[in-house]
Image (cartoon, helix red, strand yellow):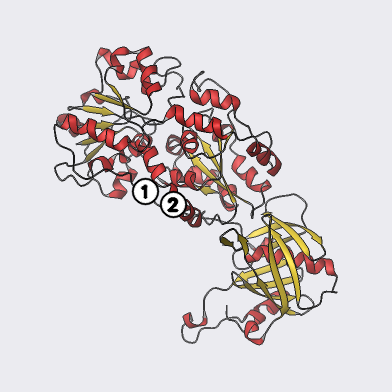
Amino acid sequence: MLFAARSATALHRLLDVLPVFAGDDRISRRFTLVPGSDFSIEALTAVERAGARTVPWEEACRRSYDLVLLASPKGDIGLLRGPRVLLPHGAGFGKTVRGEGSPSVPSGLDPAFLLPHGRAVASVHALAHPSQLTRLASVSPQAAARARVVGDPTLERVLASRSHRDHYRAALATGGRKLIVLTSTWGPESLLRRHPTWPAELLAVLPYDAYQVALIVHPNERSRLGTFDLAESLSPARDAGLVLADAYEEWAAVLVAADAVITDHGSTALYAAALGRPLIGAYDGGEELIPGSPMAEFLERCPHLTELSPKGLEDALARHRPDAVKALADSAFAERGNALERLRSEVYRLLDLAPPAVPVHARVLPPPRAATRVPAAFVVRAWCDGSHVRVERFPAFTDAPAHHMAAEYGVAGERHVQSSGLLYRRAARPASALPAMAMAWTAAGWTADVLDDYPGCRTAAVVLSPSRCLVRLRSGASLAVRISPYRDGGRLLHADPAAVLSALHAWWGSRAGTAAWPAAVTCVVGGRPFQAVVSPATAAEEQALL
């Protein structure tokens, strides 16, 4: 059996159908790269990582196969000998590529590619929804005669992974924040081409403890730029905590974890719609989106992001219409839960083999990776009202007015350390992990030393655990802070202790030296109240090793 991919997008679609053949030792699986695509550079990376066998294109054309699986009708695939099954390389068929094939017809339904020289490229053309079969029949009854509605194998993986949402959010370190996902297709009308600074701009205006931002970029755009250049172009946003999802599997796990999705006209939004996620439109119009397609009709009616701000985002989310999102998903996907079984029936019929006796199951998505870089310095806004303090933290490049800067010593750069009113560090390891003759700071020793070294710092603190800190004020007081988690139904939510320390730093400043201990302070972080009790530190707390 030959899996023939022309691009990374096509390859990923083919990998999602592997469970159809799982456990069948009668089948050998080989992969080849169909030449001719501008986006083929990273096409076989996932195959090489998995250790699968590849076949050079010239050799693949010389051999005959019992089955050839494809996810794009483009290229010289007619040279491949054997029954050919064509899968969609995306969802919805809502986008056309200018200068290719028939005007206003997506390549996946275009007779120019499906019937080159009047000869069908596919023995079976697998589609995800009956409406796609109707559209295909309207432009080519001959191609439609070979089409079958089987559903979407990639969606099967997404839906099979829904119960892993909490696991994915924990892997992303989302916590109690809202995960906002930006999705960008490829081409000149994509979100990232038209608004390349949006990820960084969103992270600059959304409070860090209330929102997390992720970006899903189409594999073609990754191939165009290269993974290195893409990551470097997004460096300011990544420094601020942007999650840049990988092009294979990880993007779908991030969608499962998401709270809302900001989308252009790409098909990724359809998978978010199938999960019921709120969709916010960010497409400015153009020639790529096919008029009358489900995506075009949805984008005309859905809420749009009118300004990059918490208010603009929340206003758009308030206009979310679950019925419209459901209708969008229903227009793109049929046979949910049955797609792999239906595809198995079609391909084993072509193979003239009885399928394996065991049921076929979609593979659960692996957990995504957390952001590779997170802020080590914040500008902090604070509002004090008696024993209540509300704080909002933003990446240090934000130029809005702020109460103070807070930096993590040993992680932030020296410029931010020197500018910070609050310096903190996190306890690295327990004393039992120290090698013989090692030298380590005590919490009290380090806080005293850092206040001597940085005259602009008014508060130095050590995060000993998620609920306990050691603090030294410029006045010399050595204090212990105990932080209670916030109860959200049956769950306990812990604040980042550094955010609570910023709230206490602001509170101490507002008390002008009149604070008495012990003291109880309500610290509002990410919109939730966390109780902090401040009392004189014990000798054991002061001697805790860093």
The disc placed on residue 23 is none
Residue 184 lies, in percent from the top left, at 51, 35
Q: Residue at x 57, y 52 (%)?
A: 241
Residue that badge 2 annotates: 164
Residue 455 lies, in percent from the top left, at 76, 71
**Residue 200, placed above or below residue 486:** above
Pointers 1 and 2 in contact (CB under 8 A)?
yes
Let me know if residue 417 appears in the view: no
Question: Badge 1: few (under 14), some or many (20 or more) residues near its Cα, within 10 Å?
Answer: some
Local secondary structure at mark 2: helix
Pick the front one: 179 or 357 = 357
Residue 307 lies, in percent from the top left, at 69, 36
Pick the front one: 224 or 340 = 340
Residue 165 lies, in percent from the top left, at 47, 51
Q: Is 323 left or right of 46, judged from the image as shown? A: right
Q: Residue at x 27, y 17 (%)?
A: 145
Q: Quadrant of residue 510?
A: bottom right
Dot 1 or dot 2: first in sequence order is 2
**Residue 422, placed above or below residue 277:** below
Q: Residue at x 63, y 82 (%)?
A: 541
Q: Quadrant of residue 279?
A: top right
Q: CA distance from mark 1 to mark 2?
A: 9 Å
Name the amino acid type tagged 1: Val
Location of the C terminus by quadrant is: bottom right
**Residue 196, placed above or below residue 139:** below
Residue that badge 1 annotates: 364
Name the amino acid type tagged 2: His
Q: Is 353 left or right of 267, judged from the image as shown? A: left
Location of the N terminus by quadrant is: top left
Pick the front one: 4 or 264 = 264
